[in-house]
Image: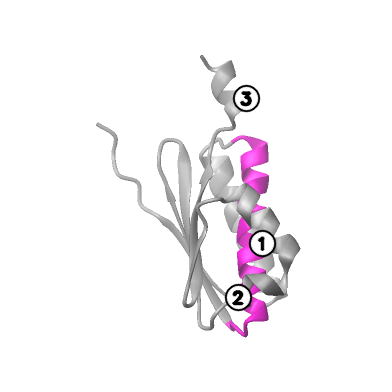
Amino acid sequence: MRAEREPYELSVPADASGLSTVRVFLRSIARTLDAAPERSDDLELVVSEVCAALVEGGSRSLHIEVRPDDSALAVSVQADAAPSTPEDNAIRGDLLGTLAPDLTWFDHGARFTVAVVSDDDADQTR
């Protein structure tokens, strides 16, 4: 039986310094969990794009919660305004659809999961 892990949480202003802090926060979590480097990059990219959509929608603050489990990170990003619509940025929509196919937008944020270990890493540990 594995112990339930506490979530990592961060609240920042929705500006350049806040988004920089979010990236450092995510890299730290990925390192702590020994995530594969490409998974860490995916996590940063998806969260950055979700935050960008929220900032474009008029958000002034962001709250990120990351819940680790054995194989993935469940991420929730909340803000004080609705995100810009996916139709506003087709490239963002394609990118998010590829890296976080379970991404769900809600009124003031989004939820998704990102794998901690890549398929290649899982094959090598077998």
Secondary element under disc 2, as helix, strand or loop, is: helix
Q: Position of residue 10 (x, y in %)?
A: 50, 65
Any magenta on residue 47?
yes
N-terminal of the pair, mark 1 or mark 2, is 2
- Give the residues in magenta: 36-60
Can residue 67 be spotted in the picture?
yes
Q: Quadrant of residue 96?
A: bottom right
Residue at position x 40%, y 55% in the image: 7
N-terminal of the pair, mark 1 or mark 3, is 1
Q: Main secondary structure of the magenta part?
A: helix
The span from disc 1 to disc 3 (Cα, nearest Å) is 26 Å
Q: Position of residue 58 (x, y in %)?
A: 62, 85
Return the mark for residue 72: none
Q: Is residue 55 left or right of residue 111?
A: right
Residue at position x 59%, y 53% in the image: 26
Residue at numbered disc 2:
54
Residue at numbered disc 1:
93
Return the mark for residue 120: 3
The span from disc 1 to disc 2 (Cα, nearest Å) is 13 Å
Q: From the viewer's perspective, is the residue at label 1 or at label 3 nearer?
A: 1
Can residue 14 be spotted in the picture?
no
| Amino acid type, residue under disc 2 in the picture | Leu
| Amino acid type, residue under disc 3 in the picture | Asp
| Amino acid type, residue under disc 1 in the picture | Gly
Front residue (pair 18, 118): 118
Relative to 121, does residue 8 appear above or below in the rendering? below
Secondary element under disc 3, as helix, strand or loop, is: helix
Q: Position of residue 45 (x, y in %)?
A: 67, 55
Front residue (pair 114, 34): 114
Circle 2 Cα neighbour tier, 10 Å, few/some/many (<14 / 14–19 / ≥20): many
> Number of labelled discs?
3
